[in-house]
Image: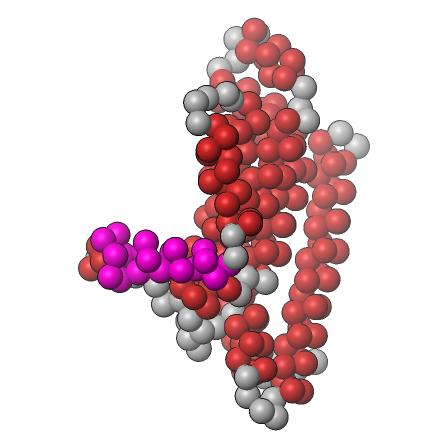
Amino acid sequence: MTLTPLEAEALVRSLQVSFAAVAVSLPVGIAAGWLLARREFPGKSLVDGLVHLPLVLPPVVVGYLLLVGLGRNSAVGGVLDAIGLPLAFHARGAVLASAVVAFPLMVRAIRLSVESIDPGLEEAARTLGAAPLRVFATITLPLAAPGILAGAILAFARAFSEFGATITFVASIPGQTRTLPLALYGLTQVPGQEAAAARLCALSVAVAFATLLASEALARRVRASTRGE
């Protein structure tokens, strides 16, 4: 079907925000997943709880906390605004909100993948003289690749569907922060826009289904390459 200007704008903005959210959070997610899987340290339970907190908090609460902590009236937000990098009510804020709510899903998938790797393989490489960074890059990272991919796809799907934190932190600004869920919500508030809302709903379902198919295909390829098939 041919997309209307509103549908095209909302779809493109959602894809941009989702891809950017994954790109920004993936390096941190890999580090956090590895740290929680391989290291014991004081306060680990607290760190684990903080990482997973956005998963159990209502998204609106997450958005409110971001607004309080990074809004233009806050200390950090004021500095960012002064140097020309505002977050609240800006596309960058939409990326941040989506990344925050999707981060726990990413970390959990990566952590489980790292925990499934036999520590003996890493220990054997270290005893042969490999530096820790080399062990991570040549053994841990490749073996954890399926989990990293799964975490990235889960984060993308969660970011694509994000609504509560986004509308609270950055509102629904046309051309800036109006993603597909926000556009759909806006249409449901206008009498006589049921057909347009249904089209956006169908578009959302199509993108979600395509993401699932792509994730399954990519997962099979990664598993095959990891096993040397």
Let me know if residue 148 appears in the view: no
Quarter of the figure with the N terminus? bottom right
Q: Which residues are magenta?
A: 59-77
Magenta span contains residue 62: yes
Closer to the camera in the image, 73 or 131: 73
Residue located 65% across and 32% down the image: 113
Quarter of the figure with the C terminus? top right
Q: Above or below — where is 127 with respect to 67?
A: above
Residue 196: x and y in percent read 63, 85
Residue located 61% across and 89% down the image: 193
Q: Is residue 147 left or right of residue 6?
A: right
Let me know if residue 59 appears in the view: yes
Q: Is residue 132 left or right of residue 110?
A: left
Q: In the displayed image of the protein, which residue is found farthest to the right?
A: 229
Residue located 40% across and 63% down the image: 169
Q: In the displayed image of the protein, which residue is found farthest to the bottom?
A: 192
Q: Is residue 100 left or right of residue 229?
A: left
Residue located 50% across and 38% down the image: 49
Residue 42: x and y in percent read 43, 22
Closer to the camera in the image, 75 or 209: 75
Residue 33: x and y in percent read 54, 33
> How are the colours assigned in the image?
secondary structure
Could you say which quadrant of the image residue 146 lies in?
top right
Main SS class of the magenta portion in the image: helix
Q: Is residue 26 left or right of residue 3?
A: left
Magenta span contains residue 180: no
Residue 156: x and y in percent read 58, 54
